Image (cartoon, rainbow, N blue to C red):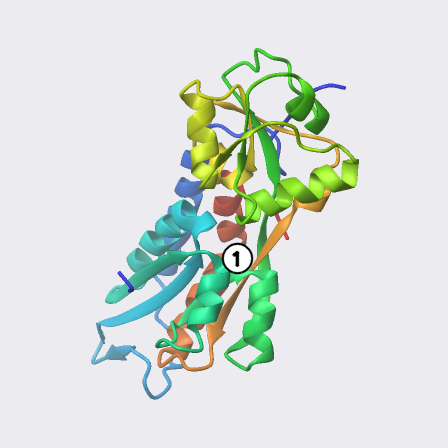
Amino acid sequence: MFGGAPQTAGFFGPRRSASIVVALAAFLAVAGCGTSQPPAPTTRPGDAGEVGGAAVPMTLRVSVDQAMRTVFSELAKRFQIDHPGTQIQLKFKRSQELADELEREPAPDVLVVRDVDMNRAAQTGQVKDPTAFAANRLVIVTPPGNPNHVFTFTDAVRSGARLAVCAPELACGAATARVAESLAVPLGPAQTERTANAVVDAVAEGRAEVGLTYSSYATSDEPRVTTLSFPGDAVSVERYSIAVTTKSENQNRAQQLADSVRSGDGHRLMSAFGFGAP
C-alpha cells in the first residue's frame, strides 16, 4: 500500500556526511527561490492547483525502487516544502515488483525503477517519456580504515577475509555475479545476506571483514565502514529511470516532481547519497 591504489567509492570521489549536508543546503536554497515565483497556469483537468490564490490539497503517489529509499524521502520533503498543499506518498519495493503491480493495482503518479523494468512499463504504454537520471554500482565495504588492505574485487573474494555478499536474486547479487564473470574471478565461500543493507551491517558489526554491495547503501553508513570503488566495476552499473504514468490524474504536478529529480540540484542530492550520473 502507499503511505593498485585505493579509490574512494562511488562515481564522485570521497563521500562524507558533510557532502550530504552541503547538497541538502543547496537543494533547500533553490527550493526557497522557487517558492517566490507564481506557479505557471498549466493546471489540467484532474490536477490540483491554485484556486483564488490558495493551494488546493492533493496527493502524489510515487513508486520507487527500494535502493532509493533514503534519497527519495529527502526529495519528497523538499518538494512538499516547495509545493504547499502537495503530499507525497512513497512506496518502496524492488523495481520488478513495482513494474508488475502496474498491471493489477491502481497506478501511481510517478514510477522510479531500474531501466530494464521501466522499459517493460513503456512497452505496454503505462508510462510516458521515461528518462534515466541516476545509476548505482557495486563497491567494496570494509571496516573503517580497510585493515585487510582490500582494494580490488579479487582481493575481496580471495583475501581470506570473511566475505558478505547480496543474495543472488537481489540486484546487487546479480551485479556481483556479473563482475565475477567479467573478471573471471569465481566467488569463493561467502555469507549471503537478504538485503543490500545487511551486507553493510555485517561488516560494521564485525560478522564479516569485507562486503560487496551497492554504493547507495554503503555511502550512508560511511561513519561505520569504509567504501571503495574497484577496477572492473563498470559491468555492475544499474541505471534508474523516472516517468509519469499515463493513468496519473495529476499529470502536471507529477511532471514537476520528475523534473525536480532530473534537475541539477536533484543530481547533486543523488550524488550525496551515493548515486552517479546515468
Which residue is nearer to you in this view: 117 or 157?
157
Residue depicted at 61% across the width and 42% down the height: 137
Task: Report x, y in % for residue 124.
Answer: 56, 81
Instruction: Tell which residue pokes out farthest to the front in this image.
Output: 189
Would you name the residue on which mark 1 appears? 263
Instruction: Tell which residue pokes out farthest to the top in this image.
Output: 147
- Relative height, residue 259 to residue 124 (above, below): above
Residue depicted at 22% across the width and 75% down the height: 56
Instruction: Tell which residue pokes out farthest to the bottom in this image.
Output: 45
Task: Report x, y in % for residue 52.
Answer: 20, 80
Asked which quadrant contains residue 275, the reply is top right
Q: Along the horizontal axis of the image, is 230 left or right of 119? A: right
Task: Report x, y in % for residue 256.
Answer: 43, 68
- Relative height, residue 238 to residue 61 (above, below): above
Report crowding for label 1: few under 14, some 14 to 19, many 20 or more residues within 10 A (C-alpha).
Answer: few
Which residue is nearer to you in this view: 69 or 209?
209
Q: Along the horizontal axis of the image, is 64 left or right of 210? A: left
- Relative height, residue 79 to residue 244 (above, below): above
Q: Is residue 129 something one can see in this rendering?
A: no
The amino acid beneath tag 1 is Ser
Q: Is residue 141 something one can see in this rendering?
A: yes
Residue depicted at 26% across the width and 77% down the height: 50
